Image: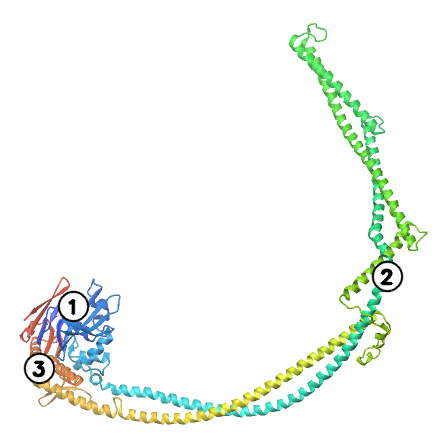
Amino acid sequence: MIIRRVELRNIFSHENTTVEFPNGIVAIIGPNGAGKSSIVDSIYMALFMGKQIDIRGGKKEHVIMVGASTGEIRVEVEIESRRYLVTRKFNVTMPTEANLYIVEGDTKKLKAMKIEGVLSEITRLLGLGGLSESDVRRLVRSTVIALQGELTEIVDIGDAERREYILSLLGLSYLERALEEIKEISKEKERLVGEWRAKQEVIGNMKKNIEKLRKDEEELQKQILVLEKKIAESEKLVSDLEARQRVVNEYLSISKTLEIALVQRRIRELEIIIEKLREIESWWNNDRAKLARLLDEISGLEIEVERTKSAILESLRELSEIFKCEVKSLSDAESLLSTLEKMIEEAETYKNLYKVYMDKFETTGICPLCGSRIEDITSFRLHLKNKISELENTIKNLNEKITIATSVVTRLRQCENKLQTLRDLLEKRRSELQVVVNKTFELCARHGISNVSIEECVRELSILGEKYSEYKGELRSLREVYAGTVLLEENVEVLWSRLRDISVLGVEPPSSLNINTIRQLVSKLSEIHEAVSRDYERALKELSSLKVSFEKLRGQLENTKNQLARYEADVKRIEEELARIKKRIEAYEVLEEFANKYLGKNGIIARELTKVTRIELERRANAILSRLRLREISISDGFEIYVKVSGGILPIKNASGGERVAVAIALRLALAELAMGRSPTVLILDEPTINLDDERVTQVFNIIGEIGRTLRQVIVVTHDEKVIDIADAVIRVENIGNISRVLREY
């Protein structure tokens, strides 16, 4: 793989940057914070980063340029002589987009899209198809791309960690994963063992159920025999009750017919009696009440007449006392009132005359009677006023007496009118009473009641009227009770004789042809009929219940037999399954034995592969160091790294900084060859000389220069100008106003 072109739009501090990468050693130079590492980080992010950002704080907001909402990385690479373009588009609010294109001249063809698709295709193109996305990222950052601070990580970590790290990068961890997967698969054995035990338990329970079902079958057969006997007894009881019910129905029918015949006889008797007493009903409904009403009304009128006479006398006494004269009648009272009215009329005339005198005297000063002049005007005026005042008092007194007299006279007139009305009405009612009394005596005579007073006559007729009502009530009741009954001409005596053998039902035959007696017999027989019917219905219900229980038991017996057959078939089937499960368990045990022996990091295969890996890694790294004219290294079984020195070995941690960088680069290239199956074509180093003195810096750049002769492309990011001495191309990066600018120098 060779990096050919990188374009950054609003990425980190790069607003609009395009960088072309030729073959050879390409140096990216600039001061700290200029945006150099951003170019290398962008290459890694575009080609290998998953959905989760694993550098620079892990957030899109840290990748997209401050103030922008979107950003884009475009990296063009060359793999196996073909060019590919990878794009990553970042959006603060939307998911990151990724696409991979094949570039052919000026055209491009979409090869893969979405992050997963792009990573999968790049992994395949690099020959790393067997690794997961995370393993690919670890391998790349441990071999051909050394991000800032990660170059010497392989020699800085502990020996045990280095062993696990290298083995996982080379895919030997798959043996451990294979072991874990087999262990996971072997959990199926545990499940099968559990299933085998569960099925054994199920078979045990089934056999217990089979034994119980056989006992149930035997018990059900016994219960069926008992029920068959009860059903036979119940059927006999139903038959006996049916026969008794027929006898009861026969005698009940005779009794009801006899009852109806007696009722017919009684109805005819009542109709004759009622017809004879029908005129009593008219008197009962009309004249009896009218007689009582007239007597009450006449009594009331007589009392009212006396009360009115008393009121008249009281009013006459009142006038006599007030006016001190004897007033004996209404005419006397009216004469008294007329006299008072004349007196007040006379007083009014004198009063008016005096007023005329007063007016004329006031005007002329001359006496209106004699025509002479009045000398003592004051005395004369006072005399006239006194006369007028006396007349006004007289008129007032007379008015008061007239008012009283008028009220009493009015009351007397009303009483006289009322008295006359009462006398007329009393006479009328006495005439009406005489008519009713005569009619009543005539009715009594027709019914054999004579020589009695009106009171006795009324009492006797009332007794007949009550009997008439009773007869009518009885007739109405009989007709209502027996409404709709067909009236048949039956011989009462014949029916009675047919009831003589009724004692078979435990009932005494009727002693007389009395309706109530026969009714009691019907009631008694109805009770017996209801009791027998209840017993019959109960017996039928019991018989039906027994038959239902019988069918239920037969169904249970059939179900029990079916369950027995199913259980026996299930036991046979499960026993066959147990045999198959046992074979599978044995197969899993063989697989577990193989996995524990050959797989895993401690298995035979892992031990052999680890040995081969250690030897091959040491050989390839030493070949690279030899080309660089540097001391070789030794890798122990525990993956401890030693530098070979004269007379012995030196732990890598005791080597100089420059040598540690050289060994780290050699191990990275060796790991790349082992993992990819071929020598890498590119190496990207971010700040490889950090924390080194000038001598070590020069040494490291010389080593990189030597490596550059064997690789097609080496990209070095540094702030040290010494790199120019080994560079085939120089790219300068500056930050002006928080925006990175790129200038290429050849």
Where residue 75 sits in the image (x, y, percent)? Answer: 16, 72
Above/below status of 280 relative to 226:
above
Amino acid at pointer 3: Thr
Classify residue 680 by image quadrant: bottom left
Residue 710 badge: 3
Front residue of 82 and 395? 82
Q: Nearer the viewer, mark 2 or mark 3?
A: 2
Compared across the picture, whether 385 is left or right of 457 comes to: left
Whether the residues at callouts 2 and 1 have beta carbons within 8 Å, the answer is no
Q: Earlier in the sequence, mark 2 or mark 3?
A: 2
How dense is the environment of label 3, judged by Cα within 10 Å: few (below 14), some, or many (20 and up)?
Answer: some
**What secondary structure is marked by label 3?**
helix
Quadrant in the picture for the C terminus:
bottom left
Above/below status of 109 relative to 237:
above
Q: Earlier in the sequence, mark 1 or mark 3?
A: 1
| Residue positioned 83% across, 74% down in the render | 495
Where residue 411 sits in the image (x, y, percent)? Answer: 78, 32
Whether the residues at callouts 1 and 3 have beta carbons within 8 Å, the answer is no
Classify residue 334 by image quadrant: top right
Where residue 660 sits in the image (x, y, percent)? Answer: 12, 81
Residue underneath mark 1: 8
**What secondary structure is marked by label 1?**
strand
